[in-house]
Image (tube, rainbow, N blue to C red):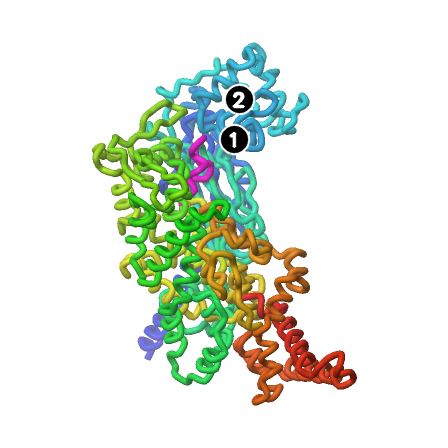
Amino acid sequence: MKLKHLILLFVLFAGLLSGELENSSQAAQLEAYLPNQAKNIELSDPDARQQLLITLKEESGSLRDVTREVKYQIVPAGIAEVSPTGYVRPLSNGTATITAQLASAPSIKIPVHVSSFEQRRPVSFYNDVIPQLTRGGCNSGACHGTPSGKNNFHLSLLGFEPGNDFEYITKESLGRRINPAAPETSLLLQKAAGTVPHGGGSRFKPDGAEIKLISRWIREGMHYDPEKEPTVTKIDIFPKDRVLPKQATQQLVVTAYFSDGTERDITRMAEYKPNQPKMSEVNEHGVVKLKDQTGTTSVMIRFQEHVAVFMTTIPLGQPTPHLPTPENFIDQHVFAKLKVLGLPPSERCDDSTFLRRVTLDITGRIPTLEQTKAFLADQRPDKRARKIDELLNSPGYADLFASKWAGILRNKAGGNLEQVARETFGFHAWIRTSLAMNKPYNEFVTELVTARGKPGTNPAVSWYRAVKDPKDQMADIAQVFLGVRIQCAQCHHHPYEKWSQDDFYGFQAFFNTLGRKEVYKLPEDDIVYHKRIVAVAKNPNTDQELKPTPLDGAALEIPAERDPRIDLANWITDPQNPFFAKMLVNRYWKHFFGRGLVEPEDDIRITNPATHPELLNQLADSFVKSNYDLKAICRTICNSRTYQLSSFPNQYNQNDEQNYARYYPRRLPAEMMLDAMNDVAGARNNFNHQPVGIRAVALPDDSANVESFFLRVFGRPQMDTACECERTANADLAQSLHLINSDTMQQILSASDGQAVQLAREKTKDDQTHIKELYLHAFSRLPTQNELETGLNHLQKKRNQSKADPKKLSLEQAEKQAYEDIIWVMINTKEFLFNH
C-alpha cells in the first residue's frame, strides 16, 4: 500500500515538475542582438562603438524593445561604459561583462572585449566626415547639395562625389573654410555649429561628436586617400521587420561591412527617413517611434550609396473570428494580414454595388438598364464570375485600357495638327487592337521597344515620335515597364536607390543608335531605324564610354549591325527579370483598388516596400505563368473576395488606407464621369474629328482636352509624361460649380432626344416605373422609399405649375423639366460621382 502511495506521489510530483518546466520555458526572457550572431562585443579602436538592442520575448511570444528600460551594469569598471540608451564605448584594453536587468525577466550577460585602445584609427574623409555632413543635411538638395550650392559653397548631393567635396572643402575659396592651426575655429565648423551666422541654422551641437570628429580630421592633416581606404560593401539592419503595438518604440542597429573584411556599428552615423510620416517617426539614434495609425509602415536607412529598410506592422488588435472564406490567393494574403492586424473586414458588397463597380473598372461605363435588370434577376451562384468574363470580352474593356495605355505612352497630338492626329489615331488603334486580341504583354512591350520603320505600317513606331530624346526614351522605358525611376541618376547617384550615373548612361546606350528620317507634314512616313554603329554612351562626369548595360546586370557586347534594343527587349521580358512582372501587376492592382501594393505604383524599390510583399510576388509569378495574360490578371483580381468587399466601413476599419479591409471609394475619372452623365441623361458626346456619340474613354489622344473644359477641370491628363500621376482626382470649387451650373451640364440635361424628353413623352409606364428605372440605370439599384416619394412629389409640383398656367408651361414641358431636375440631382450625388 505504501508503495502505491509512493508511486502516486512520484507521478504527481513529476507532473508538477514538468508543468513548471513547461511554464518556465514560456516565461518572459531577455534577448540581446549582436551583429553576425557574435557571442561578445569586440571593440578594437578607441572610437569603436556598439549600439545594444535588448528585446523582451514575452510569454505570449510577442517581442518588445526594452533597450531603454533595462538597467545596465558593467564589471569590472574601467574597460568600457554603457549609456542608459545601450550605447557602448571603450575606456581601456581588457575584458568586461555587461549585465542587463529587467524586473519581469531573468537578467542576461554580454561579454565585451576591448583591444588596441592605444591605436586610434585615422579619421576617414569618405567613411567618417561625409556621413556626418549628410546626417546634418549640409549636402541635401535644399542646402549646399543643390547644383549651384548655397552662398558660394557647393557640396555634391548627399556626398556621392567625395573627391569633389574634398576639393570644395579644403581648397576652394583659398582654403578659408579650414584652419589647420586651430581646427575648432574653422569656418566650416563654426557655421555648422551656429556660432557664426549661417543661413541653414545650427546643424550640430558646438561640443557634439560630429564637431569633434571633423576637428580631429583637420588636426590629423585632412587626409583623403580613396585607393588605400576600405570601402563599404553593404549595410545591414536589425531588426528588418517587427509586429509592434501603437505608440511602441524600436531601436534599430545598423552595421557596415567593409572591403577589408572589417565591420563597424554605424547606428549613429546612418541617416533615417520614415516613408509614412503619419505613421512613424525616427530620431538620429535609430529609434523608431510609432504613432496611432494601424497598418504597415517603413523607415529608410541610408549610408553613403547603400540603403536598407525597416518594416513594421501595427495591429489594431481586434478579434477576427469570422474572416471571409478566401476565393483565391489574393484573399489568403490579405486576410492573413488582417488577422495579424486584428482588423475586421467589411461585409461582401451587394449585387448592385458589385455590378456597377466592376463594369466601371473593366469597361469605363455604368451598366445599361437591361444589363442591371438581367444581373439582379440572375440566380446562378457564379453570376459574378460570368459577368467579369463577359466584361473582359466586351469592346468596352479594350476602349478603357487603350485609353489608360495611350496616356502612359504619351500619345499626344501636339497642337491638334491633322497630320499628327493621323499618327496618334493609328498608335491608339494598335494599342486597342493588342488589348482586344489579348496579345501577351511581353509581346506588346517587345513590339514597342524594338519598333522600327514607318508609323503608317508599324504604328508602334509612333512612340518614338512622342519621346525623341534617348535619355527620355530610357527613363520612360525604365519607369513604365520596370517601375524604376532612374531620372535622378542622370546628374548624381540616386538618393533612395542603388542606381549610379554609370547605370543611367549604360542603360541609355541601348537607344543611342537610333536614327530618324523625317518627312515634312507626313509623320506617318517618318522612318525610325538603327544606324548600324556600336552602341555606347558617355558619362559626362567621368568621360567614360559605357556599353549597353541592363539594370543590375553586366555590360553587353553588341555588334554594330545588331539593334541593341533587341537585347534590351529580351532582358526586359525575361521571366527572371525582377522588375517587369511586378510593375505590371502593381499598376493593374492600383487600377482596381485605387492604390498600389507599392505606392506610387511606378516606383518599386527596396526603400519603398510593398504593403503585402508576398502577395506582390505571387501576383507577378501568376502573371508570368499565364504567359503574360492581361485579362487573366484582371480576372484574378476581380474574382477575389477582397475586391468584392463593401466600401462601407465597420467600426474598426474606417481609417484603413492600405490593408484592404474594405473597398476604397474613388471619384470617377473625367472620361468615365462624362460618359456616365451622358448615359443617364441620354446625351451624346460631340468632339471635333470624331464620330458623334464617341465615348470619352475611347478618345485616342489628348486633342479633346483643348475643346472640353469638363475633361480638363476633372483631371484628364495632357499626356506630357509617362506617369499616371498626371491624372488628378483632387476636388476643387471649379468642379463643383461645373456640376451645378455650366453649359456642358445644361447641354447634357436638355439634349433634344435625351432621357428627360423621352420620359415626358412615354405614357405606357407610370411615374414610379420611370423613377425606378432611372435609379437602376444610374446606381444599379432601386430607389429608397424616400427617394421615390421625393421624385414623385417633384413631378406633381411641376404638373401643378403647368395646370395653373398651361400657356406659360405646357404639361410635356413641365414633366421634361421635372425629369431634368431629378437627373441633375442624381448625377450630383457622391454615389453617382464615385465608384464604390
Q: Where is residue 793 in the image (x, y as percent from the top left)?
A: 70, 83
Asked if the magenta segment contains residue 561, the reply would be no
Q: Which amino acid does label 1 sit on?
A: Thr
Q: Which of 261 and 835 is in front in this view?
A: 835
Q: Nearer the viewer, residue 574 or 323?
A: 574
Residue extent of the magenta highlight: 484-499
The residue carrying pointer 2 sits among few (fewer than 14), some (14 to 19) or many (20 or more) residues within 10 Å by Cα, namely many
Q: Is residue 55 above or below residue 683?
A: above
Q: Position of residue 303 (x, y in %)?
A: 45, 34
Q: Is residue 271 visible?
A: yes
Residue at image position (45%, 29%) is 160
Q: Is residue 800 above or below residue 318?
A: below
Q: Where is residue 238 in the image (x, y as percent from the top left)?
A: 43, 44
Q: Position of residue 77 (x, y in %)?
A: 50, 31
Sooner in the amino-acid sequence: mark 1 or mark 2: 1
Reading the image, the residue beneath label 1 is 134
Task: Give residue 666's quadrant in the image.
Answer: bottom right
Q: Is residue 647 above or below residue 282?
A: below
| Residue 566 falls left or right of residue 11 | left
| Residue 186 falls left or right of residue 58 | right
Tell me the SS state at disc 2: helix
Looking at the rendered structure, which numbered label has been put on residue 214? 2
Q: Can residue 310 be seen in this view?
A: no
Q: In this view, does 117 lie above or below 99?
A: above
| Residue 459 falls left or right of residue 298 | left
Q: Which of 81 and 588 is in front in this view?
A: 588
Residue at image position (30%, 59%) is 439
The residue carrying pointer 1 sits among few (fewer than 14), some (14 to 19) or many (20 or more) residues within 10 Å by Cα, namely many
Looking at the rendered structure, which numbered label has been put on residue 460? none
Q: Distance between the residues labelled 1 and 2?
A: 13 Å
Identify the main secondary structure in magenta. loop
